[in-house]
Image (tube, rainbow, N blue to C red):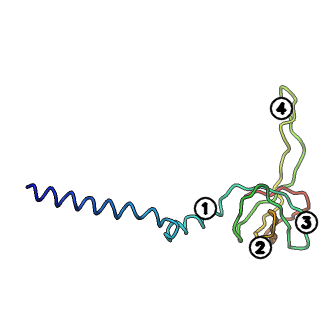
Amino acid sequence: MRKLNILFTAFLLTVFMTVSVVPARADEDPVNKARDAVLGYFIPVSGTVEGVAGETVRVRLEGDRDIPVKARLTVFKEGEPFYHPVTNEKIGNTEFLAGRIEIKEKGDGGLYIAGLKSGKAETGDKVRL
């Protein structure tokens, strides 16, 4: 019985030692790479349209988030301001859907070049994922 306990303990230690090594290689795991690639398309980002030339749109995103090529963003036009019904303080502005863009290439400093998928974008419009 004692030999069986020692053998079982040695087996468990071997299993736990091999399992503890796995997280050290988590960066190389193809499942983690696929997860990160998919989640990269759902990072909350916002920015503004800096220029439009035909179907090409220059977009500057806020912050230091890096979004992947082929990510699709929504373009909004800013509308009339709206106010709190009791205090009459400005809460914000209405927004109207202007179009959708798809990132084609990355630039420097948060600048991205995108292609217009639908609608119409103008300089100063807001973009969000």
The spot of residue 15 in percent (x, y) is 29, 62
Query: SS of the residue at dot 4?
Result: loop
The amino acid type, in three-letter code, at marker 3 is: Gly
Query: Pointer 3 and pointer 4: residues touching (CB < 8 Å)?
Result: no
Pointer 4 or 2: first along the chain: 4
Residue picked out by circle 4: 84
Q: Nearer the viewer, mark 4 or mark 2?
A: 2
* SS of the residue under disc 2: strand
Sequence order check: which comes first, mark 1 or mark 4? 1
The residue that disc 3 covers is 51
What's the amino acid at mark 1? Answer: Leu
Q: Nearer the viewer, mark 3 or mark 4?
A: 3
Is residue 54 placed above or below 8 in the rendered structure? below
Name the residue carrying label 2: 105
Do the numbered discs 2 and 3 sit on residues whose CB atoms are within 8 Å?
Answer: no
Which quarter shows the C terminus?
bottom right
Horizontal and vertical percent for residue 98? Answer: 84, 59
* Mark seen at residue 39: 1
Residue 31, position as x, y percentages in the image: 49, 68
The amino acid pointed to by label 4 is: His
Query: CA–CA distance between discs 1 and 4?
Result: 36 Å
